[in-house]
Every structure is written in structure tokens, then in C-alpha cells.
Image (cartoon, grey):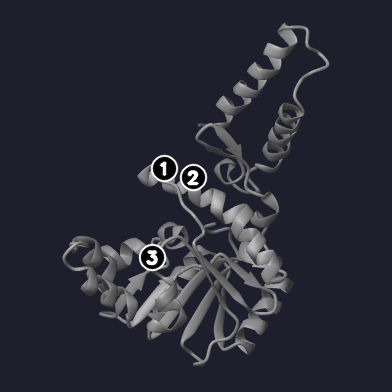
Amino acid sequence: MNIALWIAQILAIITEHLSKKEYQVIPMNVVMLGLSVFFVIGRCSPKNQSTKEKLLMLQDSTVIANPEFAELADNERIERTARALEQNNIKTLIAENGEEANRMFFELLPDGAEIFLGASVTLEKLGIKDEIDRSGRFDALRPKMFAMNRETQGREIRKLGGTPDFAAGSVQAVTEDGRVLIASNTGSQIGPYASGAGKVIWVVGAQKIVKDVNEGLKRVEEYCRPLEEVHMQELYKVGTEIRKILIVNKELRPGRITMIIVKEQLGF
């Protein structure tokens, strides 16, 4: 459902009440919804984020992703977060844009490497997913796993995805004191990220930087979940849930995890 249809529905509700001369009984939720429309539209200029990421329609109800979590961190905040991540044994690179992030990513991944990709809008947008899955340069595990029979090859699928040489994807929040939050419905990427993968590469838009873990959890619930709901409905006509959350406070093995922070709004 697009924004024009949403506005039309709101106006229709208000008009219905006005046509009945019920000037004093327009429901407060209708008034608040109307105000939300104008608030969100006002923030959806080209210099900010897309309308889709601000205004969401799910089934018969309206869901608005909290726009405060779409704002890019400034350079000082990015640098401060990067230093904290390094202190927590997470090697951190800073990319000026998506093109530079793409180059950095493939400099970390040798040709022929075995790699498992967590589902990631960020990697899709940067072209990383297609390069890994289709170029033939890498031993891409997800296409293999999707081609297998879950009924008869479940054990093999779990082993392939659980202990890859490389795992890559994105995260939902990064705190200024260097902690990382990954939310998942299935949990398929959590095992490799936590310990199963030999090396991990995360590509993260700078809008995902938050003050602390509590704010990170709020971002997951108020921004990531509704956007992922829309994404899953569009792709598969199914919803999503936050069933599992991994919080990485500090990595045990220096050099195992690398994060590329990108000064662009990427993913959710």
C-alpha cells in the first residue's frame, strides 16, 4: 500500500465523520494518524531517507518505523564508535561510501573462500551478495544450502551453515561503547557470528550507531522489526519476529571479526 492510498484512507475516515456532522467526535487515533502522516512526509525529502523506510503499511494497520533511528551518525560519533570497537577486538574500517565499502569487503575475502552470507539488505544493495553467489569466484554456501532437501539433508545443511570459513552480513545496532546487536528470526547467522565461523565481516550503515545497548534494543523493536516485516511481506508474503538477539560485548580472538562502517544509510 503506498503513501497516497494511506492519505486517501485517512481523509475518507475524516470526511465520513464530517458528513455526519460529528464535528466533535473525530476519533483521537485518526487525528494522531493524520499528524503522523505530515510528520513523516516532512522528513522524507531526498536528503533524508526513502518514503518506504519511514512509512509502512502492514495488512490493515499502519506501522511507522521510528525515524530517529534512520539518522546518520556524524564523523565524530563514527570515530568514537570505531575506537571502542577496536578496544573490544573488533577490527573496524570506515568507508566514505558504498563503493569503497564494496572494495574493502573483497580485499578481506580471498578468491575461492568458503563463505556463508546472513540475509542482508545491505549486502544486496552493495552488490556483494550477487558477486559472491553468482561470480564463481567463491565457495558460496547459501546457494548450496537452498538447493538441498531440508527433510532429508537437514544435518548437512546445519553443518554447512554452522562452521564456515567466512561469515558475512550486517547487524542491527552498534553502540558507542563498542558492542554489537544482531537480531534474527531463525537464528541461522547467530551461531557463525558468535563462534562458528573462522572469520566474520560485517558491513554497517552509519545510521545503526546508537548510544548504548538499551537504545540498540529499542532500535531493533521500533525500526528494524517493522521494516523487516514489510520486506518479508514483499518477498515471501510472510511476517517476521524477533526470536533471537545476539549481543557481542567483546570478541575473544583479535582479528576474527571485521566491521566496515559506511557513511551512508544502508539496510535497516
Q: Which residue is more in the foreground, 239 or 172?
A: 239
The residue identified by callout 2 is 230
Q: Secondary structure at mark 1?
A: helix
The residue identified by callout 3 is 128
The residue identified by callout 1 is 234
In percent of width and height, residue 247 lies at: 57, 75
- Quadrant placement of the C terminus: bottom right
Going by the numbered disc 1, the residue's amino acid type is: Glu
Q: Secondary structure at mark 2?
A: helix
Going by the numbered disc 3, the residue's amino acid type is: Ile
Please state if 58 lies on the left or on the right of 11 as rendered. Answer: left
Q: CA distance from mark 2 to mark 3?
A: 22 Å
Q: Quadrant of residue 77?
A: bottom right
Label 2 or label 3, whichever lies nearer to me, is 2
Please state if 74 lies on the left or on the right of 226 as rendered. Answer: right
Q: Quadrant of residue 134?
A: bottom left
Please state if 85 lies on the left or on the right of 75 as rendered. Answer: left
Marks 1 and 2 in Cβ contact (< 8 Å) = yes
Q: Residues within 10 Å of mark 2 (few under 14, many from 20)?
A: many
Q: CA distance from mark 1 to mark 2?
A: 6 Å
- In the displayed structure, 183 sits above or below 108; it is above
Going by the numbered disc 2, the residue's amino acid type is: Val
Residue beneath the point at 63% across and 61% down: 207
